[in-house]
Image (cartoon, rainbow, N blue to C red):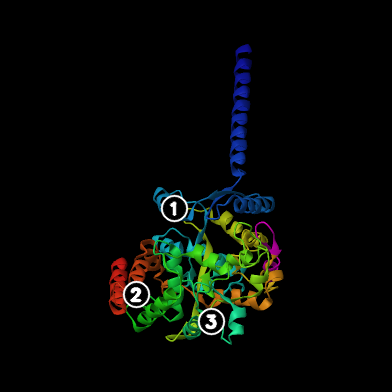
Amino acid sequence: MKRLGVIVLSCFIFFVASTMVFAGGQKEEKAESVKEVTITLWTTEEQPERMEIQRDIAVRFKEKTGISVDVVPVSENVMGERVTAAFSAGELPDVIYHPLNFTLSWAEAGILDSATATDVVEGLGEGTFGAGALDLVKVGNEYAAVPVDGWTQLLVYRADLFKEKGLQPPTTYSAISKAIDTLHNPPGLYGFVAATDPSQVYFMQVFEHVALANGVDIVDDNGNVTVNTPQMIETLKFYKKLAQASPPGNLYWQQSRELYFAGKTAMIIWSPFIMDELAGLRDSVPVTAYDDPTTRELAKRTGFITNLAGPGNPKGSGWTDVRYFGITVDANVDASRKFVEFSMNEGYLDTLAIAPEGKFPVRKGTTDNPVKFIEGWKKLPVGVDRKAPSGEIYSDAVIEELLKGLETGSRWGFKKGYGSLTSKLYDTRIFAELVRQYIDGERSVEETARIMQREAEALMK
């Protein structure tokens, strides 16, 4: 009996131990199931103050959803290489905030989850987004990524001088040409300051803008290169006139801004990031045309044009840069989708506040309030050393012109699905080199257009 009792007791202890192990396993499994979800966002907004805002958005998102976001800064110059390497290793981040020039090539390579991006756009309301920003990344019936913000390149001009001389606003090749003929009086006043330094991406941006205005695109609907055209030859001749109305030397964004702020040029082409500086809100970029470097006088005398037209394209065009949230094929789809939706809704004004002078709302509002985000954006403070809302500095007409540019703006090849060629042209700067050589008289305009055609065809292979 004693032996039997020992056996019974041993069996009971084994049962209890087994039960505890099993229960422990359940607890372990349960702990694993409630493990915190973390997604990774790679962002090109790497400046410390911009990182702080993005991390604040991530904190608010976690408070709402319980999902953490690891915000990782990646320089735009190395973003392409980092993404390609991560894709090969199967270690892509969940979401990438990136510029337009990466979007279509990443979609073609299978890096982006276009179906999920399209679901996000449709869930937020396709009609709440500007059509221009969506069209640039349309792939079949889907969108490669979700538009976040954008800016449109500006022709910045001395509206007071134009009015004084009875000149029409510089919205066309002919109006710009006439203004140069009337106002150009160096060294006191240059008619224009064009981009002429081929080592700078600014050259490509300005030249593409001027070419788009005249209806130049680099490919047709079938992907055939269309550079050597009468419109391109006309564009090259016009650009040479802009360069001849500029100071000598290699010019880029720095000289054009300095000369405009000194009151020594009538027209430049620049991004909207110039607008807070024009109003004297940044000490490191003073307005030198007046005794008071913080004055808003120059801003008051300035006009802005987003849509330029050449004789080959009477409707005209603008040049736009849009930034996107790309959800990758390695992403936690549900968590990533929630983050992008949050950033484009409750957190959208905070997203724009990262740099409101250059982050125009591509989502105008909600289905219930179609202008909610436009109105909110106008109230966001811009500036560095001093701050003021854009709506306080500039009129409603100016604000409307800026936002309109996102609708009329375009880029070479993107709407036809060949934006990757444009990216290669920017990477190589080959067009900038050839245009500069033509400006310097090294070859004829016809020969320049033929070589540009040949170089573009080579990049398509």
> For the residues marked 3 and 2, what is the alpha-carbon distance in whole angstroms?
33 Å
**Residue 155 in picture, x, y percent from top left:** 53, 75
* Circle 1 crowding by C-alpha within 10 Å: few under 14, some 14–19, many from 20: few
* Residue lying at 36% horizontally and 69% vertically, measured from the top left: 436
**Residue 225 in picture, x, y percent from top left:** 32, 75
* Circle 3 crowding by C-alpha within 10 Å: few under 14, some 14–19, many from 20: many
Label 3 belongs to which residue?
A: 170
Instruction: Pick the quarter of the image with the C terminus.
Output: bottom left
Q: Is residue 376 magenta?
A: yes
> For the residues marked 1 and 3, what is the alpha-carbon distance in whole angstroms?
37 Å
Label 2 belongs to which residue?
A: 223
What amino acid is at disc 2?
Gly
Q: Nearer the viewer, residue 288 or 242?
A: 288
Q: Earlier in the sequence, mark 1 or mark 2?
A: 1
Q: Secondary structure at mark 2?
A: loop
User: Pointers 3 and 2 in contact (CB under 8 A)?
Assistant: no
> For the residues marked 1 and 2, what is the alpha-carbon distance in whole angstroms?
28 Å
Counting the numbered discs, the total is: 3
User: Closer to the camera: disc 3 or disc 2?
Assistant: 3
What amino acid is at disc 1?
Val
Q: Secondary structure at mark 3?
A: loop
Q: Quadrant of residue 236?
A: bottom left
**Residue 13 in picture, x, y percent from top left:** 62, 22
Label 1 belongs to which residue?
A: 78
Q: Which segment is the magenta one?
A: 375-388
Q: Nearer the viewer, residue 318 or 127?
A: 318
Q: Secondary structure at mark 1?
A: helix
